[in-house]
Amino acid sequence: MFAMADPKVPPANVIELEEGLRHLHRMEMQTKLRLDDVEVKLEAATKLLHRAQIIHERSLAAEMTQQRMRLESERYKETTVVLGPDVDKYAVETSKVNCAERMHLCKARCCRLAVALDFKDVEDGLRWEYARPYELKRDKASGYCVYSEEKTHRCHCYDQRPAICRTYDCTHDKRVWDDFEKMIPAKWMDEVAVTPLVQIRIPGK
């Protein structure tokens, strides 16, 4: 028989349930990343042991690279985990681009590009694509980030936005501007409904 729930203890609410599921998913993803690394090492070590019976650090590293490439090629159809940069997003230097003066021209094109979240973003409650952890969730119809306001494109998660969004600089990004100084938007974006999945990277990385 199942034990009855204590009537004095209120049932878990939706927020608590979501927090629990996020915690379980984080643990699962961490385990998957560790297992992938262990598998690669075992594959490489096994091959070297059969070949020479001696393992050298450089040889092991080279063999691991080859085995990683092989495994990635075999598993290209499987779900992969993409994490954002391991930095304190509240301490990074933010972009100096005058977005407010340019928004009416660029239509917040950067909000249609793929952004990888880190675990802090997930803990902050930012939504992500479950089929592509941890890619920031986007509207399937428009391609815009789900936190981008439909008409103004203002960010509804601005204070909690990812480090990639905070540091992204469109000054030299030809996906956004044909000429940044003259404020001429890239023309191809006007012809494509949804942009391809392109990782925005922190400048200098």
Image: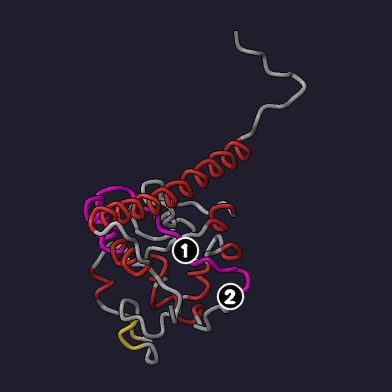
Residue at 30% across / 67% down in the picture?
62
First of labels 1, 2 by sequence position:
1
Residue under label 2: 92
Identify which residue, 142 or 171, lies in the foreground: 171
Quadrant of the image for the C terminus? bottom left
Find residue 84 and name its label. 1
- Residues in magenta, as a range: 65-92
User: Which quadrant would residue 171 be assigned to in this image?
Assistant: bottom left
- In the rendered view, would you say 136 is above or below 204? above
Three-letter code, disc 2: Val
Alpha carbon of mark 1 to alpha carbon of mark 2: how far? 13 Å
Residue found farthest to the bottom: 181
Task: Judge whether residue 67 is colored magenta.
Answer: yes
Residue 87: image location, x then y, percent: 56, 68
> What is the chief secondary structure element of the magenta stretch?
loop
How many C-alpha atoms fall within 10 Å of the one at disc 2: few (<14), some, or many (≥20)? few
Residue found farthest to the right: 8
- In the rendered view, would you say 105 is above or below 46? below
User: In the drawing, does residue 74 fall left or right of residue 102?
Assistant: left
Residue at 47% across / 46% down in the picture?
31
**SS at mark 2 in the image:** loop
Residue at 62% across / 73% down in the picture?
91
Task: Judge whether residue 89 is colored magenta.
Answer: yes
